[in-house]
Every structure is written in C-alpha cells, then in structure tokens.
Amino acid sequence: MPRKKAAPIDTGLEEIKRAFNRALFLTFSKQKLLFAFCVMAFSGLLVVFFRGLALHSGQWVTMSLTFLPVFICAGILLSMGLILTRVYHHEVKGMPVSYKEILAKSVELVIGASYVAVPFVLVYLLLWMVLGLFYLLKEIPGLGDFIGVILAFGPFLLNLAALLLMFSTVGVLFFVTPALALKSSDRMRMAGMILHRLKIDVFTNCLHFFIALFPLLITALVLTLAAAMTGSTYLDVDHTSEVVLQWFFIMLPFTALLAPAMVFFFNFAAESHVAMQKARRAMAEA
C-alpha cells in the first residue's frame, strides 16, 4: 500500500512564513500604496524643509534640524499606520474595505496618536540643550580646546542617546500601532499589554520586529545610496532654493519606492500583534 504523506508540522516558523506571505501579498494594493505615498511625501516635505534650514547653520543647530523632523514624522507615520492596520484587518477578515468609513471612524484615534511624538521631541530637545553646554564650554578662551578633549565622552553619549531614541520610535511604530488600531477601546491598559507581550517571548517579538524592518532598511539604504550618488555626480548648484527644490524632486520618487516596504512593515506588525495575542491566550488557558 502506498505510504501516506506526513502532515506538515505546524511550527512557529510555519506561522511566521504564513504571516509574511499574507502581509507581502496584501502590500501591493493601489489604494494603500497611494495613501502611504501621500502621507510619506508630506513627511518628506517636512524633512526637506528642515534640511534646507540647516544648510548654512552651525553644527549644533544642524543636529537639531536633522533629528527633530524624524520625531515629528514618527507621529505622522503612526497615524498613517493606524489606518493601514485597520484596512489590513478588514482585508484579512474578508470584509469590504471602505477607506472613507475607516477614516471617519478613526479621526479621534488618529489625532490622539499624533501626540505620541511629543514626548520624543521633548526628550530630544533636552538632550540637544545639554549638548549645547558642551559646545559652549569649547568656546571658553584658552581652556576651551582642553575641556573639549577631556569631555569628549559627553557629546558621544548624548549623540548615542539621540540615536537610540530615534530607533525606539521605530519600535513604537511596530508595537504600539497595532495595539492602538485593534484595541482602541482599552487604551489605559495598552502599555501594560505591550510590556506583557514582550515578556512572554522576547526572541519571537524581536524576530518579528526585524523581519518587518528588514525590507524597509534595505530599501531605504539602496535609495539613500542612489540619492547620495546623484548628489555627488549630478547635482551642482549653490543657491539654497535650488538645492531644496532638487531635494524635493528626489524625495518624491524616494518616498514612492519606499511606500511598499512601509506598508509591509505595518502589515507584518499587525500579524505579529495578533500572533502574540493568541500566544498569550494559549498560555492563560494552559
């Protein structure tokens, strides 16, 4: 008698593979990509504006004008992620998707979510002001250079803190967005739910996070490299207005090509949230 084929073993890897394929397949929707592009283009416009202001500024001011738009855009992207997550939830459930209806039901939530960026902006401004003290000490006549050498560890630690703060905003986008979008009626317990989720399985949560982030990082790296090559080999203008306009017109295809990776990021964040919620319920029932 012919031997029966063994049923595939349902492992955590199989679940991740199904979630990845579903998130990827539902990424390439014209409406979602267009929506993501419009929001990201607006965020890119803010980045270009701040970079234009930083063109002829000192190092201390340039640093603030580099990081501040990142934290401001994080609030905008979080609001966008809420809409994308709810759209994805409808798609996975096979429910009809109406962007107008989803937007109408999410207005209050989106406005509230945009304020998530405020603590990050305030913390960064505090770091930036402390960094300014080190720049001020360097300007002391006679002793400034010596003090700058001795206290070099201070700016290093402050810059490291700024980078970690920026990376933490990405973590907020991944973990907080689906929790807000799918559990908006239980906001008071949201932070506790996220911390409990992380405690359940740190490895799986980190694995999900890096899987969602990997396409975004690779796409952003390639696009940034292409933009840098264009700037070094083609762009050759001196006027600030011309430089800003060139950045603006480069930003448009940049955000358009980055949009699919961003949509996938939020799709997979929703998949991860649902998977960890199921794992938590399974542990509670065991």
Image: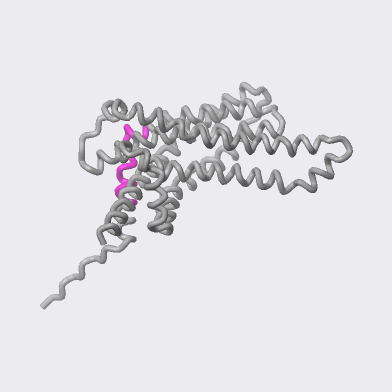
Who's the residue at 71% across and 35% down the image?
132
144, 55: nearer the viewer: 144
Quarter of image, res 26: top left
Residue found at the very far right of the displayed protein: 142
| On screen, residue 189 above or below 41 | below
Q: Is residue 259 left or right of residue 11?
A: right
Q: Which residues are magenta?
A: 20-34
Height in image: 54 above or below 194? above
Q: Is residue 39 magenta?
A: no
Q: Quadrant of residue 110?
A: top left
Q: Is residue 220 left or right of residue 139?
A: left
Left or right: 67, with 82 as reference point: right
Coordinates of residue 286 in the picture (x, y in percent): 26, 62
Q: Where does the N terminus fall, quadrant-wise?
A: bottom left
In front: 248, or 54?
54
Residue drawn at x 66%, y 47% as measured from the top left:
157
Task: For residue 282, say whether it is visible.
Answer: yes
* Whether residue 40 is visible: no
Residue located at (62% from left, 36% from top): 126
Residue occupying the point 31% across, 28% down? 103
Query: In the image, residue 65 lies at what x, y percent?
Result: 61, 31
Up the image or down, 273 lies above or below 62; here it is below
The location of residue 70, given as percent across then percent down, is: 54, 35
Tell me, what colour scheme is on the image?
one colour
Q: Position of residue 268 (x, y in %)?
A: 36, 47
Examine the image and state in which quarter residue 246 appears: top right
